[in-house]
Amino acid sequence: MFFIMGITQGRKDFDYDQMIVCEHCGSYGRYQVYMTYMCLSLFFIPCLKWNRQYYVQSTCCNTVYSLEPEIGKRIVRGEKTEILPENLTKVQAGYKSSFKRCSNCGFETQEEFEYCPKCGKKF
């Protein structure tokens, strides 16, 4: 008889929407919450998960933060939870984009315009 088992690292993304002004780059963005874990699989079926860690990534500059486990567990349960700056610890700094994005139409440009060339709204 053969036993097929293995230990792998997994990642699960959660459907979470919170708009922010990023502390790192100063742009508008939102938080993406995900969990990493180690998993024991038997016959390709995940049986046991451990070492769960929760992370938040900003969409504007991709800065990664470690999230307090209590807040992460609330998000997993589907509770409406606001992530506050004191709940986060910076893990990896992101990059600041050189693009300017219009808040009205979404047009992106690298030029230093005062008004959007597409819709005319002030940047």
Image (tube, helix red, strand yellow):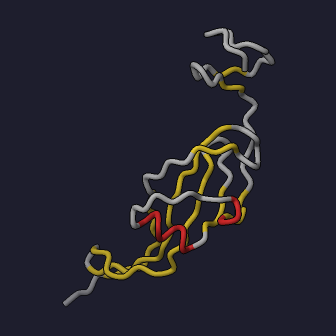
Residue 18 percent coordinates (x, y): 55, 48
Quarter holding the C terminus is: top right
Instruction: From the viewer's side, name the closer residue of 28 and 107.
Output: 28
Residue located 33% across and 78% down the image = 41
81 is higher (above) or lower (below) than 27: below
56 is higher (above) or lower (below) than 41: above
Residue located 54% across and 52% down the image = 32
Residue 74 percent coordinates (x, y): 47, 68
Q: Residue furthest left?
A: 1
29 is higher (above) or lower (below) than 2: above
Q: How many marks?
A: 0
Image quadrant assignment for residue 90: bottom right
Residue located 65% across and 66% down the image = 87
Instruction: From the viewer's side, name the closer residue of 56 and 71.
Output: 71
Instruction: From the viewer's side, name the closer residue of 84 and 97.
Output: 84
Residue 58 percent coordinates (x, y): 62, 49
Q: Locate residue 105 relative to residue 48 in the image: left or right.
A: right
Q: Locate residue 33 relative to residue 45 in the image: left or right.
A: right
Quarter holding the N terminus is: bottom left
Image quadrant assignment for residue 93: bottom right
Q: Locate residue 49 relative to residue 120 in the image: left or right.
A: left
Residue located 32% across and 75% down the image = 46
